[in-house]
Image: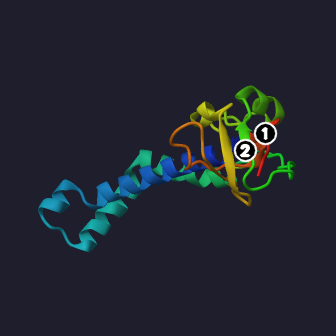
């Protein structure tokens, strides 16, 4: 059997779409307009649901697909992230975000176009490239402050995204 390679995100989306559609079909069969209008008993709704499960081909196909997903030879792609290596940073340092081109060359991009650094650097963050900030804290998630661009305190940052500002005395 051929191997299927997909990202965790793609697999979750595929599985959830199938699962969601199955639940919608089950709910619609159980609470049909007739059952709703006649205020049918729970037993009657369960009986209608079972009839539906036994006869509806689309429903049966979705169930088979969901079962087969578990049997397929699917390799979940997990992007390799480079470990932060720049330990010369300290709180208070003024830093500049690297250019998109620099980060892409150094770390590469995943299938969604994000730069492969810890937490990812996505296209929505591209405007940060070549702008400045100060390091507020360093840890699992690097916190920045005093941005030279507006409204960018909610992203998750890492030290691989930035470089020290040369020639500037850091605190």
Looking at the image, which is closer to me, 118 or 30? 118
Answer with left or right where residue 142 lies relative to residue 35: right
Q: Position of residue 21 (x, y in %)?
A: 43, 49
The quarter of the displayed image where residue 10 is located: top right
Mark closer to the observer (2, 1): 1
Vertical relation: 165 (above or below) 89: above
Image quadrant in which you'd find residue 70: bottom right
Provide the secondary structure element on which disc 2 rests: strand
User: Could you tell me which residue is drawn at 16 percent across and 57 percent down?
Assistant: 34
* Residue 88 percent location from the top left of the image: 86, 51
In the image, farthest residue toward the left: 38
Query: Is residue 86 among the parts visible in the rendering?
Result: yes
Question: How many other residues sit within 10 Å of disc 1, few (<14), some (14-19) or many (≥20)?
Answer: few
The relative height of residue 163 versus residue 56 in the rendered view (above or below) is above
Task: Using residue 103 as the reference point, say whether residue 21 is left or right of it.
Answer: left
Q: CA distance from mark 2 to mark 1?
A: 8 Å
Residues marked 2 and 1 touching at CB (< 8 Å): yes
Residue at (30% x, 55% y) in the render: 28
Residue wearing tag 2: 94
Q: Position of residue 26 (x, y in %)?
A: 37, 57
- Look at mark 1 in the image and give the residue it sits on: 168
Residue 78, position as x, y percentages in the image: 75, 47
Mark 2 or mark 1: name the one nearer the start of the chain. 2
Left or right: 140, with 83 as reference point: left
User: Residue 32 or 164: which is nearer the viewer?
Assistant: 164
Residue 58 found in image quarter: top left
Count of all numbered marks drawn on residues in the image: 2
Mark 2 closeness class: few <14, some 14–19, many ≥20 residues within 10 Å? many
Q: Nearer the viewer, residue 8 or 110?
A: 110
| Residue at point 19%, 61% (across, down) | 35
Disc 1 secondary structure class: loop
Q: Please identify the quadrant where the N terminus is shown.
A: top right
């Amino acid at each position: 059997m051929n191997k299927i390679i997909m990202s965790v995100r793609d697999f979750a989306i595929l599985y959830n779409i199938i699962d969601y559609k199955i639940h919608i079909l089950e709910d619609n069969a159980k609470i049909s307009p007739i059952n709703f209008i006649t205020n049918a008993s729970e037993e009657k709704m369960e009986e209608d649901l079972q009839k539906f499960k036994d006869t509806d081909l689309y429903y049966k196909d979705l169930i088979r697909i969901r079962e087969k997903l578990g049997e397929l030879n699917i390799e979940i792609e997990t992007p390799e992230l480079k470990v932060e290596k720049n330990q010369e940073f300290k709180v208070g340092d003024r830093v500049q975000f690297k250019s998109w081109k620099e980060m892409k060359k150094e770390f590469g991009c995943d299938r969604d176009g994000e730069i492969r650094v810890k937490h990812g650097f996505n296209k929505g963050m591209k405007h940060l490239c070549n702008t400045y900030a100060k390091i507020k804290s360093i840890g699992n998630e690097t916190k920045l402050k005093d941005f030279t661009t507006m409204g960018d305190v909610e992203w998750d940052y890492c030290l691989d995204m930035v470089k020290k500002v040369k020639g500037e005395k850091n605190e």
